[in-house]
Image: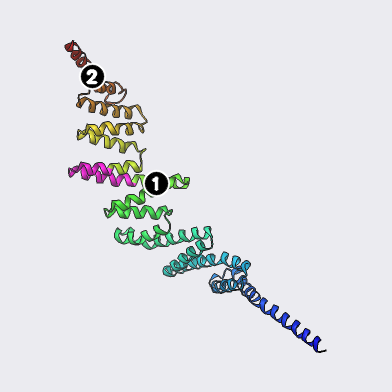
């Protein structure tokens, strides 16, 4: 009887130990089950603290199936709380929740929620900076827009506003960087083509004015550097290529004319445009007394208002070259 009693007691102790070992997991599942109806009801604010406690308990209990489920919803809860705060007009609380959503989404490999959070963050900053931007307080606008751009560089509306604000403040270094980053996006997806074109146009307007001011001030090297930035950002813009070439010819920088003509000629699409490039190159060689090269390029002029001058000058040079050859005999 005594032995039987010991066995019964030992068995009871074993069952008790098993039950105790199962208690943490049971408690974790109970906590998860409390959160589920709140999630189903989209009551994210109340669900979030329960989920965070559940996650901590699940790690301690090594209940990895629950950990996986909870991690799926925590970023979503922060994101949805952020959206609710936006609707309520509490932008400070919205940003706190949205930044947290992005943080935990990255931690839990939730790319979709991270992307959505970044997009919402930039929208908030765009809204916050709109008043300053519209009233042309560009310094204040930059301070706000830069935060949104850092969070989401693919918000092209915000990026264009930020770039414009920089340029209006004469901070061309940062303005150019943002514009060129927007232009680069067009290679990633067709949806970025339109904003990229807007960036190209705005960048061209700002930098052409800057270059012209530098030419007027007599600092042609600074002007050329500005035009280099513009052309590197948008090399297919034939008008900008031609402007640089014409300015170099105007300043009689013949070596630059010859160097830049090849790049310019590659993007000219009409015979008139191409003929303009050949004419300027011919004038450059003509001015350097490289007569045969001048003739060769004058002969490439086939259209436009430079056709007759090119033909006349080519004939003069051919006669001159012939006369020199005769004299040398």
- Look at mark 1 in the image and give the residue it sits on: 183
**Side (left or right) of 185 relative to 255:** right
x, y (%) of residue 306?
Answer: 26, 25
Q: Position of residue 103 (x, y in %)?
A: 48, 64
Q: Which picture quadrant has residue 257?
A: top left
Tell me the quarter of the image containing the N terminus: bottom right
Q: Residue 261 appears at what percent x and percent y?
A: 30, 32
Residue at figure coordinates x 32%, y 41% from the top left: 231
Q: For the view shown, which residue lies furthest in the bottom direction? A: 2
Disc assigned to residue 117: none
Q: Residues within 10 Å of mark 1 (few under 14, many from 20)?
A: many
Q: Residue at x 66, y 78 (%)?
A: 23
Identify which residue, 300 or 61, lies in the foreground. 61
- Element type at marker 2? helix
The extreme front residue here reads 3
Above or below residue 23? Residue 223 is above
Density class for disc 2 (Cα within 10 Å; few <14, some 14-19, many ≥20) is few
Up-down relation of residue 76 to residue 279 (above or below): below
The quadrant where residue 247 appears: top left
Residue appearing at x 21%, y 41% in the figure? 220
Q: Position of residue 139 (x, y in %)?
A: 29, 60
Q: Earlier in the sequence, mark 2 or mark 1?
A: 1
Residue 297, quarter of picture: top left
Whether residue 90 is in magenta: the answer is: no
Residue at horizontal 44 percent and vertical 47 percent from the top: 192
- What type of secondary structure mainly makes up the magenta span? helix
Residues in magenta, as a range:
202-226
Residue 23 falls left or right of residue 246:
right
Q: Return the mark for residue 312.
A: 2
Reply above or below: 145 against 186. Answer: below
């Amino acid at each position: 009887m005594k032995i039987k009693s010991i066995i019964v007691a030992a068995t009871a102790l074993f069952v008790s130990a098993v039950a105790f070992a199962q208690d943490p997991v049971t408690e974790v599942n109970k906590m998860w089950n409390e959160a589920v109806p709140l999630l189903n009801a989209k009551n994210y604010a109340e669900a979030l603290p329960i989920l965070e406690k559940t996650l901590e308990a699940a790690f301690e209990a090594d209940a990895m199936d629950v950990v996986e489920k909870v991690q799926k919803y925590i970023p979503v809860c922060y994101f949805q709380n952020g959206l609710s705060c936006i609707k309520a007009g509490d932008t400070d609380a919205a940003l706190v929740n949205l930044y947290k959503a992005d943080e935990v989404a990255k931690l839990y490999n939730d790319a979709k929620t991270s992307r959505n959070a970044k997009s919402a963050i930039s929208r908030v900053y765009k809204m916050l900076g709109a008043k300053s931007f519209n009233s042309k307080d560009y310094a204040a606008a930059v301070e706000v827009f830069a935060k949104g751009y850092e969070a989401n560089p693919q918000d092209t509306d915000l990026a264009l506003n930020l770039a414009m604000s920089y340029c209006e403040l004469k901070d061309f270094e940062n303005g150019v960087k943002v514009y060129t980053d927007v232009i680069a996006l067009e290679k990633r997806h067709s949806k970025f083509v339109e904003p990229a074109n807007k960036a190209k146009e705005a960048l061209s307007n700002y930098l052409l004015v800057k270059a012209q001011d530098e030419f007027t001030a007599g600092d042609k090297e600074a002007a050329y550097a500005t035009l280099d930035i513009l052309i590197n950002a948008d090399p297919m813009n034939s008008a900008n290529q031609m402007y640089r070439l014409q300015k170099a010819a105007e300043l009689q920088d013949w070596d630059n004319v010859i160097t830049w003509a090849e790049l310019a000629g590659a993007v000219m699409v009409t015979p008139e445009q191409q003929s303009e490039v050949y004419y300027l190159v011919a004038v450059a060689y003509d001015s350097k007394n490289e007569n045969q090269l001048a003739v060769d390029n004058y002969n490439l002029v086939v259209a436009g208002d430079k056709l007759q001058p090119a033909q006349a000058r080519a004939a003069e040079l051919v006669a001159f070259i012939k006369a020199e050859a005769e004299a040398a005999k």
